């Protein structure tokens, strides 16, 4: 069996790859593994279970709840809430495990199961591996040890989760948003109620789009993967800014008053300066990935802020932040982690903090985001190649060295093998878009020739 857990839980097409049986079995296995690890020792265990609005989330939630309760875990069912809300409530309520059912920005037919440990943190890799092993043992016939009578778990609908999470978001804001007009694109997803409520309570005038989830329309032509509607709406309504989330609202991208996109790197730059000014940017450091725009790196150097870069993936950003005690990190895609207030990327919190900076300074978002110049990036996927040789091929190494010499200090080259497909990603940055395209095309040809 291939590894079930990816970088962000277990995902697949619901009712094909991710079945009710799999969701139930993984939940029972997770309960047993955490019990073995001593997580439940001395008390009756509790879990928080939430989901995004996908239709498949309804039967998968039922399966997860049944699995946990059958293993003796009491379940607090919080319903449709963002992934960061489930993480927050897991920690805030002192639960032993959290489970979120979502496929984030993926299309509606997909779904996923993501587990959180006590405190709302992602499960350690070794625990995920152990859950897979235990699940497979019992799937092939080894019987579970099952509680009976009063030992089975009880299931409660925890309706207070919505208000508890929104109150948390408001409490950590540095200032109110009075006088700010914002358009929110909720991607017909998990934040369709939470985000407008939080912005309104913080004092903003709110216009919403993509806030009518019906179980089938999540991420459909809207949200952080489709910014066209938001860009138009911000201009139409004369808003100060727009905020776009993905299906589970762990991402945030923005649009300025002129309808221009503000990506995750720019958001990080704005928040880094704000947090340094308030004394909350520990070690004057922000964490990004190797895909962070070179313009972001140059801006942080100019402002005297250190940039630590990790492998691509918010899990690696978070690992670096926790290991070194950094307060802010994220990705160009809009996963932004403010570790003092969240254990994972939180799109609503990020949007609130960005709007708070606009309100506090009286400056436009375009002006604030102008702290960095976003250099053109060109990404080419080269399929059907031996990706394992990308770091050892002499031909590829020579081509990369030639490209780096041509680009000089105002550009860079990154070759990265895909984690899931037989392809190599060629990324080139340059001060000039045409140069970036030309260099990327030349490198892609060499990769195809040398590794194909």
Image (cartoon, grey):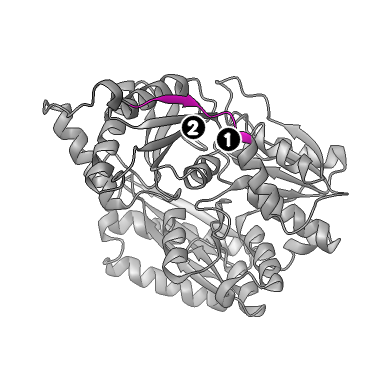
> How far across and down, in percent of the image, does residue 263 sit?
64, 54
> How far across and down, in percent of the image, does residue 230 sit?
73, 39
Q: Nearer the viewer, residue 78 or 435?
A: 78
**Is 350 rendered above or below residue 50?**
below
Picture quadrant of residue 285: bottom right
Q: Is residue 452 visible?
A: no
**Secondary structure of residue under mark 2:** strand
- Say whether disc 1 or disc 2 marks the residue closer to the N-terminus: 2
What residue is drawn where x is 34% and y is 27%? 153
Picture quadrant of residue 396: bottom left
Q: Along the horizontal axis of the image, is 217 left or right of 102?
A: right
> How far across and down, in percent of the image, does residue 9 sit?
37, 41
The range drawn in magenta is 153-162
**Is 88 rendered above or below residue 247?**
below
**Secondary structure of residue under mark 1:** helix
Judging by the rendered image, the residue that carries numbered circle 2 is 50
Q: Mark 2: few, some, or many residues within 10 Å (few <14, many ≥20)? A: many
Q: Is residue 227 visible?
A: yes
Discs 1, 2 touching: Cβ within 8 Å: yes
> Is-magenta flag for residue 66?
no
**Is 319 rendered above or below residue 411?**
above
Judging by the rendered image, the residue that carries numbered circle 1 is 161
Residue 445 - label: none
> Is-magenta flag for residue 155?
yes
Q: Along the horizontal axis of the image, is 34 left or right of 93?
A: left
């Amino acid at each position: 069996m291939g590894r079930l857990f990816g970088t962000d839980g277990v995902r697949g097409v619901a009712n094909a790859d991710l079945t009710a049986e799999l969701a139930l079995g993984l939940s029972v296995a997770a309960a047993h593994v955490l019990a073995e690890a001593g997580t439940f020792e001395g008390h009756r265990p509790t879990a928080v279970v939430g989901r995004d609005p996908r239709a498949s989330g309804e039967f998968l939630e039922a399966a997860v709840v049944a699995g946990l309760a059958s293993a003796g875990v009491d379940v607090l069912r919080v319903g449709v809430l963002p992934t960061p809300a489930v993480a927050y409530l897991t920690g805030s309520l002192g639960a032993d495990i959290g489970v979120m059912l979502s496929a984030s920005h993926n299309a509606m037919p997909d779904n996923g199961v993501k587990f959180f440990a006590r405190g709302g943190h992602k499960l350690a890799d070794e625990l995920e591996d152990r859950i897979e092993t235990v699940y497979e043992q019992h799937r092939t016939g080894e019987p579970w040890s099952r509680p009976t009578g009063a030992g089975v778990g009880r299931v409660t609908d925890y309706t207070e989760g919505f208000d508890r999470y929104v109150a948390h978001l408001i409490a950590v804001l540095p200032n109110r948003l009075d006088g700010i007009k914002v358009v929110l694109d909720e991607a017909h997803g998990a934040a369709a109620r939470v985000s407008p409520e939080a912005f309104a309570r913080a004092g903003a005038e709110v216009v919403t789009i993509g806030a009518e989830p019906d179980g089938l329309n999540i991420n459909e032509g809207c949200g952080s993967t489709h910014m066209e509607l938001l860009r138009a709406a911000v201009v139409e309504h004369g808003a100060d800014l727009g905020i776009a989330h993905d299906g589970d609202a762990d991402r945030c991208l923005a649009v300025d008053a002129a309808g221009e996109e503000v990506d995750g790197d720019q958001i990080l730059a704005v928040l880094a300066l704000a947090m340094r000014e308030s004394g909350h940017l520990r070690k004057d450091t922000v964490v990004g990935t190797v895909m962070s725009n070179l313009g972001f790196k140059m801006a942080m150097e100019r402002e005297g802020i250190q940039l630590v870069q990790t492998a691509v993936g918010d899990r690696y950003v978070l690992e670096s932040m926790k290991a070194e005690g950094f307060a802010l990190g994220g990705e160009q895609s809009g996963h932004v982690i403010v570790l003092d207030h969240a254990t994972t990327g939180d799109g609503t919190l990020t949007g609130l903090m960005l709007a708070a900076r606009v309100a506090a300074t009286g400056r436009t978002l375009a002006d604030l985001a102008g702290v960095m110049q976003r250099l053109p990036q060109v990404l080419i996927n080269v399929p059907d190649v031996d990706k394992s040789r990308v770091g050892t091929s002499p031909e590829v190494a020579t081509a990369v060295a030639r490209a780096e010499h041509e680009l000089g200090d105002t550009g860079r080259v990154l070759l990265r093998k895909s984690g899931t497909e037989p392809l190599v990603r060629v990324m080139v940055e340059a001060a000039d878009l045409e140069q970036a395209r030309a260099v990327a095309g030349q490198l892609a040809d060499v990769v195809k020739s040398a590794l194909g």
